[in-house]
Image (spheres, rainbow, N blue to C red):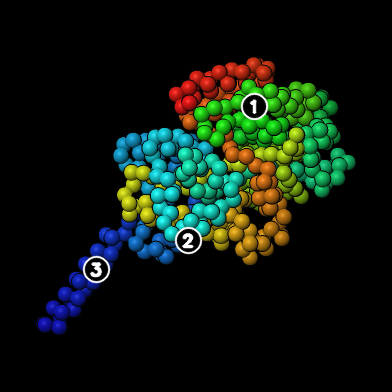
Amino acid sequence: MKKTWIRAAAVAAGLCMSAAAFAQKTEVSFYFPIAVGGPITKIIDGYASQFNKENPSYNVTPVYSGTYQETIVKVLTAHKAGKPPTSAILLSTDTFTLADEGAIAPIDDFVKTDADRAWLKSFFPAFLLNGQFDNKTWGVPFQRSTVVLYWNKELFKEAGLDPNKPPQTWAETISMGQKLTKKDASGKVTQWGIQVPSSGFPYWLFQGFSTQNGGILANAAGNAVKYDDPKVVSALQYWVDLSRKHGIHPPGVVEWGTTPRDFMERKAAMIWTTTGNLTNIRSNAKFDFGVAMLPAGERRGSPTGGGNFFIFKKATVAEQTGAYKFAQWLTQPERAAQWSIDTGYVAVSPAAYETPALKKYAADFPPALVARDQLPHAVAELSTHDNQRVTKALNDGLQAALTGAKTPEQAMKDAQAEANRLLRGYK
């Protein structure tokens, strides 16, 4: 009887200890901008599970929150309601907005040791630009990208072009695009020479053109833009002319989401899109294709893009600490390398490219290095205070010019006036 009582007591004590251990787990919510389901969610679920096993005092729970736009609305709504997530991947361009709302804590608050400082310095400098202002780092890179050129080597051969030489300049884009554009007997275009999407993120694609033309859209403080700069206007004129003057680009607004599919269906011989589409295109294109830096105008250039890891200010200290550990864990060179291999996003640190896995992958598939090699020519993605409305002013202007509703000059003049109005209070 006594032994039975002792065993029962021991079991009860063990259950209590297990319950106590479970209760002591710190919950870390992690909002990730993608719809539920698909290969990316499986990867993120796997990351969370592995981190939780290695760090048993934390329980990271991914929350799949829709698009980037839907995700920032959800997290800011939760923040204002006093129930914010612990962490989230959001567009790096949302940094000003998140900081202005008092929603995020600077990463610097958690950097205490030499190892922490070394980690923060380990990222590509170009990827830190959008996460830094007021001498603080507000977010660290996770899934980052640049705009790159994809070209169909088989269609180049058919057009009498060297399949291994994509256009290097704006002029070559036009001359090659003319040879690559095909029409049927009725005069309808069946294959466009080049396609650059202008829905979804028109400002981002346009920033390739404006940067190549020597224009910078916004200052580092995020309180002034130069939409009406003559260099910006002439860059927009070039984009408009690809369709209206040269006839090598689809007219009007080109959809972001359908552009990779148009490329894979041979409706476009060359496209501009994110390096984040690399794995998708590699897996599904039924032809040999190439990837290259964007062609140069006065210079080469592309904006950086993609998401940063943010930690929320109203989370508890324990939750923030868990989120910080998870951010460091996610961005270790080996994991950043595998994420790049699995998704096509650019690995966020030079050290990732020195890992055996990414070295082997790049040796087998050299296009994986193009976006990294373009980083020295990259500029910060357009980001300002009141970013969504200031960016919308530019997007509206770009689409007005591309559809012919306004001249490029008038479109940019109107966009500048609206941006000036919105940014007046941030001077």
Which residue is tagged 3?
17
Residue depicted at 49% across the width and 37% down the height:
94
Q: Earlier in the sequence, mark 2 or mark 3?
A: 3
Asked if residue 51 is positioned above or below residue 413 in the image, the reply reads below
Q: Residue furthest right?
A: 160
For the residue labelled by badge 1, is the local secondary structure a helix, a strand or a loop?
Answer: loop
Mark 1 vs mark 2, CA separation in Å: 48 Å
Q: Is the residue under label 3 in contact with that under label 2 (CB below 8 Å)?
A: no
Residues under labels 2 and 3: Cα distance? 34 Å
Location of residue 396 by image quarter? top right
Residue at image point 48% right, 42% down: 135
Q: Earlier in the sequence, mark 1 or mark 3?
A: 3
- Name the front one of labels 2 and 3: 2
Residue type beneath disc 1: Val
Task: Give the crowd class for mark 3: few <14, some 14-19, many >=20 residues within 10 Å.
Answer: few
Q: Which residue is mark 1?
A: 253
Q: Nearer the viewer, residue 63 or 25?
A: 25
Q: Which residue is mark 2?
A: 115
